[in-house]
């Protein structure tokens, strides 16, 4: 078992980070490699798990640290939810009449097909764009920054100090040997030949900067090249059906146990509750469960993954909605949606990885022939705004 338990009354933010870091490094296998739980591991059954018994300041720290990790980690990272071990576990149960309904079957027929994604890059375009981007990099010569602080008091792990002044001194950097081509190739996934072609096309000025401060130049080059590759991926990615359908039985268990926050969805949910990840998800679930146009909705499980070039992506909700024709009481039309909730309805305001996954998902659902993918959504008003653009219909009263 890689289970870890820690107790410490530390107050310092830095010390808390160190303690959490040490705890998370404990889980290793017999051969010395770190162990990572599979993504489909049920909640509470993880091996790679750190338990903290917090005082008040530690509890606040963990909550803010979790938020910070969500904002700062890279594209492929996933931050697991905090589980409150003091909370009694709750069970959410599948509502069988809805699981066996034609509404759910038809919804799954639209969104349950597997796809594969492919990206075909044009090497000449990557080389041309890479040379242009790296030719615009400006790197200052090495400079040593010196600052002086005097410590006046240390209390409860907190240091009180006074800044006495600072200065800068020009210096010649000494760098360890570095395989520049290998480093750029590894970090951008470009072929070595492509990287070589980009570097040999650079002006003398940029090559001089590279020689003067290679580490800084490489960091800027990585950033520029990744930006180019990202834009090209969105433009050139394509999706196709594999011919397989995801198993409803594997994805939707009879019941699930959780210590996380849940919201009742008895009227129209596939389950009697949903596990919500944000206040927006909670608010939307309450609205969906109480609105007459909604026939059925569900929170998509984490194991429902849309493949993308930067990792799997799981949207938030899937819905079946129904509209009646006032001129014909017998006329009823059903509509099928998948939505992603965010704190904004503006795609440009999302983090790069969030925006990219939504753009990839658009192409995934296009390959499935589904028009009702709405993202990002932060209210029923933005739901209707995006539904109007997608299928020329609205569903909620405003």
Image (tube, grey):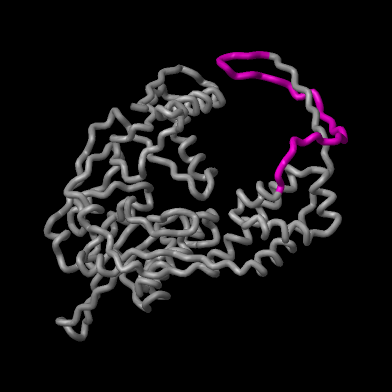
Residue positioned 44% across, 17% down in the render? 8
Between residue 102 and residue 377, name the one nearer to us: 102
Tell me if 24 is positioned left or right of 153 in this view. left
- Residue 148, compared with residue 262, is above or below; it is above
Residue positioned 70% across, 20% down in the render? 161
Question: What residue range appears in magenta?
Answer: 153-180
Residue positioned 40% across, 57% down in the render? 341
Instruction: Estimate the x, y position of residue 127 in percent, counting from the top left.
Output: 69, 64
For residue 113, what is the image quadrant? bottom left
Between residue 196 and residue 357, name the one nearer to us: 196
Residue reaching furthest right? 170
Q: How many tags in the picture?
A: 0
Q: Is residue 320 visible?
A: yes
Residue reaching furthest bottom? 327
Instruction: Estimate the x, y position of residue 362 in percent, counting from the top left.
Output: 43, 67
Q: Is residue 396 visible?
A: no
Is residue 351 covered in magenta?
Answer: no
């Amino acid at each position: 078992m890689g289970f870890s338990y820690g107790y410490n009354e530390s107050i310092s933010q830095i010390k808390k980070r160190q303690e959490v870091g040490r705890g998370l490094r404990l889980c290793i296998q017999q051969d010395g490699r770190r162990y990572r739980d599979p993504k489909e591991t049920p909640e509470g059954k993880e091996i790679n798990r750190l338990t903290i018994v917090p005082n008040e300041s530690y509890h606040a720290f963990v909550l803010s640290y979790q938020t910070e990790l969500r904002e700062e980690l890279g594209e492929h990272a996933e931050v697991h939810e905090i589980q409150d071990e003091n909370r009694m576990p709750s069970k959410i149960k599948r509502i069988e009449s809805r699981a066996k309904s034609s509404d759910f079957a038809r919804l799954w027929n639209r969104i349950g097909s597997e796809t594969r994604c492919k990206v075909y890059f044009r090497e000449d375009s990557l080389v041309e764009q890479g040379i242009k981007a790296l030719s615009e990099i400006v790197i200052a010569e090495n400079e040593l920054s010196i600052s002086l602080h005097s410590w006046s008091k240390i209390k409860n792990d907190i240091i009180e100090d006074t800044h006495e002044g600072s200065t800068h001194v020009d210096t010649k950097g000494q760098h360890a040997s570095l395989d520049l081509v290998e480093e750029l190739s590894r970090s951008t996934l470009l072929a070595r030949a492509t990287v070589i072609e980009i570097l040999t096309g650079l002006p003398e000025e940029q090559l001089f900067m590279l020689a003067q401060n290679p580490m800084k130049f490489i960091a800027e080059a990585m950033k520029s090249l990744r930006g180019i590759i990202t834009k090209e991926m969105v433009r050139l990615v394509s999706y196709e059906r594999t011919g397989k359908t995801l198993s409803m039985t594997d994805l939707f268990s009879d019941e699930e146990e959780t210590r996380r926050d849940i919201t009742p969805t008895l009227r129209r949910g596939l389950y009697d509750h949903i596990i919500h990840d944000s206040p927006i998800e909670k608010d939307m679930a309450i609205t969906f469960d109480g609105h007459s146009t909604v026939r059925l909705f569900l929170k998509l499980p984490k194991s429902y993954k849309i493949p993308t070039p930067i990792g799997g992506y799981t949207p938030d909700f899937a819905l079946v909605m129904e509209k009646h024709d006032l001129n014909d009481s017998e006329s009823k039309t059903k509509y099928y949606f998948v939505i992603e909730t965010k704190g904004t309805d503006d795609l440009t305001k999302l983090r790069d990885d969030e925006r990219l996954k939504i753009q990839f998902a658009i192409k995934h659902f296009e390959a499935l022939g589904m028009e009702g993918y709405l993202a990002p959504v932060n209210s029923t008003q933005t739901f209707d705004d995006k539904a109007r653009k997608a299928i020329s219909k609205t569903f909620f009263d405003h």
